[in-house]
Amino acid sequence: THPIFLFLIGMTFFNSIFGMSYNILLPVFARDIFDVGSSGLGLLGSAAGCGAIIGTIFTASLGNFKHKGRLVFGGAISFGLLLILFAVTSSAFAFFPLALVLVFFAGLSTSVYMVTVMTTLQMLVPDELRGRVMGLYYMTFSLMPIGALQSGVIAQYTSAPFAVAVGGAAVVLFAVVMGVFNRQVRNLGSVA
């Protein structure tokens, strides 16, 4: 019933179901779009992983910072937009170095906002509810296989780039709607 907790867990849900499902389709991009084989697939995954590590280190270095809401919204929106850009440029140009850069920054941005979501939840939830709330958080985070199903079905009937773009758009839409209609979430962490 708490709007901040609902948003943070909802953000995790949308990230798991729609955003992170791009990982499942990377083999299709490597084989059919970029024609780079298994080594190219490894580079795509490594680029996302390197971005995620840098995003985690950056977020951890901020400590208890102000304007957590802005970082969550900005990270979520940039992650979704980067996925859309990755999908569009991959199908239009099939330029592999650009794809590596976009996947790197997608990994960075998702890490920034997901680390902020997790730490904010742990700091705001009352002690007596922390175990239950974090259990729910991790349950929504573990829904990525369901995201693989939805992205696979969309890709089968349309294309892999379209499926990734749909996932990115869903993440952006959820973040924008929550940011517009919920001032409490938007001002999250205004005072550190």
Image (tube, rainbow, N blue to C red):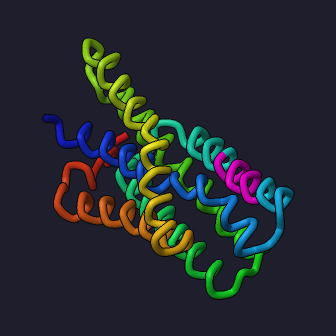
Residue sitting at the far front: 157
Residue sitting at the far top: 128
163 vs 97, nearest the viewer: 163
On the rendered image, what quadrant is the C terminus found in? top left
Residue interval drawn in magenta: 44-52
185 vs 132, nearest the viewer: 132
On the rendered image, what quadrant is the N terminus found in? top left
157 vs 64, nearest the viewer: 157
Image-based side of 169 in relation to 148, left or right: left
Above or below, 107 against 162 in this view is: above
Image-based side of 167 in relation to 184, left or right: right
Q: In the rendering, at what x and y percent does residue 159 appear? A: 53, 73
Image-based side of 159 in relation to 36, left or right: left
Residue 157 visible from this viewpoint: yes
Q: In the rendering, at what x and y percent does residue 146 appear? A: 42, 45
Residue 50 colored in magenta in the image: yes
Above or below, 145 against 31 in this view is: above
Residue 104 visible from this viewpoint: no
Rendered image quadrant of residue 174: bottom left
User: How many numbered discs?
Assistant: 0
Residue 25 colored in magenta in the image: no
Residue at x 49% of width, y 50% of height: 148
Q: In the rendering, at what x and y percent does residue 78 appear? A: 49, 65
Residue at x 25% of width, y 50% of height: 185
Residue at x 86% of width, y 57% of height: 39
Q: State whether the magenta stretch is mostly helix, strand or loop.
A: helix
Q: In the rendering, at what x and y percent does residue 10 appear? A: 30, 45
Residue at x 18% of width, y 55% of height: 182
52 vs 167, nearest the viewer: 167
Residue sitting at the far bottom: 92
Residue sitting at the far right: 39
